[in-house]
Amino acid sequence: MVRRVRLGVIVPSSNTVLEPLTQAIVASITDPDLEVTVHFSRLRVTKIDLSGDASLQFSTEAMLAAAQLLADAQVDVIGWSGTSAGWLGLQTDDSLCREIQKVSGIPATSSILALNELLRASKAEKIGLVTPYLTSVVDAIRKNYAAIGFPIAPERERHLVLTKNSDFGLVTEAQLDAMVSEVANQGGADVVAIYCTNLRGARRAAAWEKTHGIVVLDSVATTVWGMLKMVNVSPASVMGWGSIFSPQQ
């Protein structure tokens, strides 16, 4: 009998990258006894900076409203496919996911909760970071990771100084190729986080890992990884999207 699993994903409203990538990752699952579908709900997000109004985009109330729409579809798990906890405080996603489950009765995870779980499991010592964000946002991310034992050295970080979320989706794979190459080869990173769900990194992860001998933690892919684990679907059922989906993970 085919098992049907519904993944519910909260999406920043101006994001145009994560939905097709998430669908493509899930489409690579070839288990004949498994039917996985993805369902999306949008949260209004148009810019990323450290201002008060930008931070309010990620209010618990707004998140819960998006989650409740997914609950109407009777999804099996809800994933916040966004990286805001990186600069707002890594603990914010823990509390958010508890609130989502409390209100909806549906287990929840996030891109960053899953990414951090994979980061801890990797035992990496040299963390690389690739983002489109402003320097002030990147500084906040680096500070938060240093506080949990994962310092990110300046030579292992590249960012594009962008603030409009819609602009993040225009960054090309060629630009990301260059940024990852610099972080891995000049900076010596052994794990590289693609830290924005509106960047086209997921499809390049396997190639970067092969070329540079690194582990890639792409934030779109980590959301899928975390949701699959939460509903007891082996991430190894995903084919061709990088080492985080290998059986040992």
Image (spheres, rainbow, N blue to C red):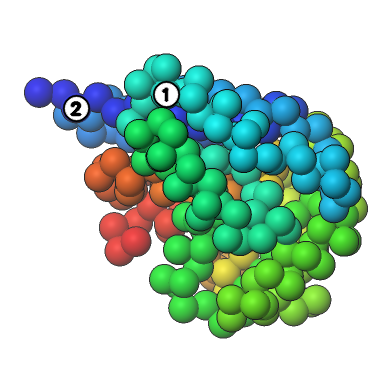
- Quarter containing the N terminus: top left
Q: Position of residue 79 (x, y in %)?
A: 48, 39
The residue shown at (30%, 64%) is 248
The residue shown at (79%, 77%) is 155
Closest to the camera, between mark 2 and mark 1, is: 1
Left or right, residue 157 beside residue 79: right
User: In 3D space, how far apart are the residues under numbered discs 2 and 1 (Cα atoms)?
Assistant: 19 Å
Left or right, residue 185 beside residue 72: right
CB within 8 Å, label 2 to label 1: no
* The image quarter in which residue 59 lies: top right
Say what secondary structure mark 2 lies in: strand
Left or right, residue 4 beside residue 131: left
Say what secondary structure mark 1 lies in: helix
Q: Nearer the viewer, residue 68 or 197?
A: 68
Residue topped by disc 1 = 71
Q: Position of residue 150 (x, y in %)?
A: 61, 77
Amino acid residing under circle 1: Ala
Q: Position of residue 213 (x, y in %)?
A: 54, 70
Residue topped by disc 2 = 3
Query: In this picture, is 18 found above or below 219?
Result: above
Amino acid residing under circle 2: Arg
